[in-house]
Image: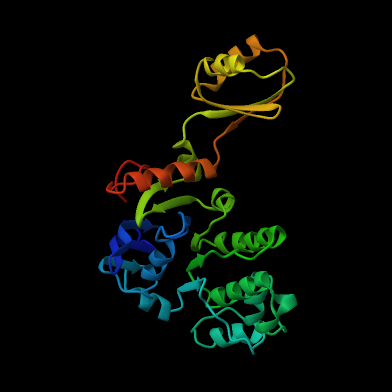
């Protein structure tokens, strides 16, 4: 028997005058999935989240949470959200802010548990107006989870956090998702999507241009990168010889290091070592999420009329 999806977006569209912010987005997310929404500024990430939460009305298409109207799921306390525009009353303490939201729900977590999950215990008595940017994000997270939701939306959750705070945030998030809850988060930190998401949905120009696991998304960019240092004098003849090696697609040279992108890194490396025994500090790496992001969003902008994502074969 098919399980009711946590989120079902079907041919979702949203226009603001002549601007098509969301243009035919169809996404199905199962309970327990951790999904990252990626895309450049203006790709439609935040608008898609607003439509899924019922905070905006679609121009066309439908959005369902747990098989029904998003507002019903929210009223039942099954959905939590940490949004960029989410404001907390500046005169309240963090604990009072969490307690205020908890009082509006039927089966909330205790205030103490929500504060602990968000790593806010030590700032519980601080007023919201006195919080740093990173502390404010953690307080918003505590407010989002106090309803004890089955589904959590996070829009740029680690914005304004330093590296250590980001790590702490995702440690607490792992505890939340390990209980089988569904999480959808939009982020500009591509390493976060790579490290914490089971699945990545990439948007460009209001359309889905990729939908797959992090490894599947990165695999869209073919080849590997070979980086090496050298001690010899670089010349135009050197560039020509390296570009002629088997499998070489691109070559970059900077200072005393060069980088080759190759479609056959084994063949390239064998030929490179046979020709040069004076290179050193050789690294062979796969493409990163940044590479995939740039390739897919550029492709999405160029092929804006495409109706199917480039991964998983068919429209979602």
Left or right, 166 with respect to 200, comes to right
Q: Nearer the viewer, residue 243 or 5?
A: 243
The residue at the point 46 percent across, 51 percent down is: 200
Q: Nearer the viewer, residue 214 or 102?
A: 214
The residue at the point 29 percent across, 67 percent down is: 15
The residue at the point 60 percent across, 59 percent down is: 174
Give the number of marks: 0
Colouring rule applied to residues = rainbow
Residue 272, by quadrant, is: top right
Left or right, 134 with respect to 214, comes to right
Q: Residue furthest left?
A: 60
Q: Position of residue 282 (x, y in %)?
A: 68, 25
Left or right, 292 with respect to 225, comes to left
Above-or-below relation of 307 to 109: above
- Which quadrant holds the N terminus? bottom left
Q: Nearer the viewer, residue 37 or 300?
A: 300
Left or right, 40 with respect to 124, comes to left
Q: Position of residue 159 (x, y in %)?
A: 60, 64
Above-or-below relation of 261 to 18: above
The residue at the point 59 percent across, 49 percent down is: 191
Residue 22, by quadrant, is: bottom left
Q: Position of residue 97 (x, y in %)?
A: 60, 85
Q: Nearer the viewer, residue 238 or 279?
A: 238
Residue 95, by quadrant, is: bottom right
Q: Residue furthest front?
A: 236
Q: Position of residue 144 (x, y in %)?
A: 54, 74
Q: Residue furthest top?
A: 274
């Amino acid at each position: 028997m098919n399980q009711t999806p946590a989120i079902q977006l079907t041919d979702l569209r949203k226009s603001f005058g002549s601007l098509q912010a969301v243009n035919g987005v169809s996404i199905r997310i199962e309970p327990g999935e951790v999904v990252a929404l990626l895309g450049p500024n203006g790709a439609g990430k935040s608008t898609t989240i607003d439509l899924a939460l019922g905070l905006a009305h679609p121009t066309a298409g439908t959005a369902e949470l747990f098989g029904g109207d998003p507002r019903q799921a929210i009223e039942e306390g099954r959905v939590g959200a940490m949004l960029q525009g989410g404001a907390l009353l500046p005169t309240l303490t963090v604990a009072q802010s969490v307690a205020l939201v908890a009082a509006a729900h039927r089966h909330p977590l205790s205030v103490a548990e929500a504060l602990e999950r968000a790593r806010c215990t030590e700032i519980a008595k601080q007023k919201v107006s006195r919080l740093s940017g990173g502390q404010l994000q953690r307080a918003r997270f505590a407010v989002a989870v106090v309803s004890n939701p089955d589904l959590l939306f996070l829009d740029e959750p680690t914005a304004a956090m330093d590296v250590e705070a980001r790590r702490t945030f995702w440690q607490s998030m792992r505890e939340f998702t390990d209980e089988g809850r569904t999480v959808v988060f939009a982020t500009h930190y591509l390493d976060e999507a790579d490290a914490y998401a089971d699945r990545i949905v990439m948007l460009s120009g209001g359309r889905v241009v990729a939908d797959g696991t992090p490894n599947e998304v990165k695999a869209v960019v073919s080849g590997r990168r070979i980086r090496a240092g050298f001690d010899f004098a670089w010349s135009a003849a050197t560039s020509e010889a390296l570009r002629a090696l088997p499998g070489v697609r691109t070559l970059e040279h900077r200072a005393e290091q060069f980088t080759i992108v190759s479609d056959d890194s084994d063949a390239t490396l064998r030929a490179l070592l046979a020709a040069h025994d004076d290179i050193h500090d050789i690294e062979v790496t796969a493409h990163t999420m940044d590479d995939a992001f740039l390739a897919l969003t550029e492709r999405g902008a160029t092929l804006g009329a495409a109706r199917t994502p480039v991964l998983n074969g068919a429209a979602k």
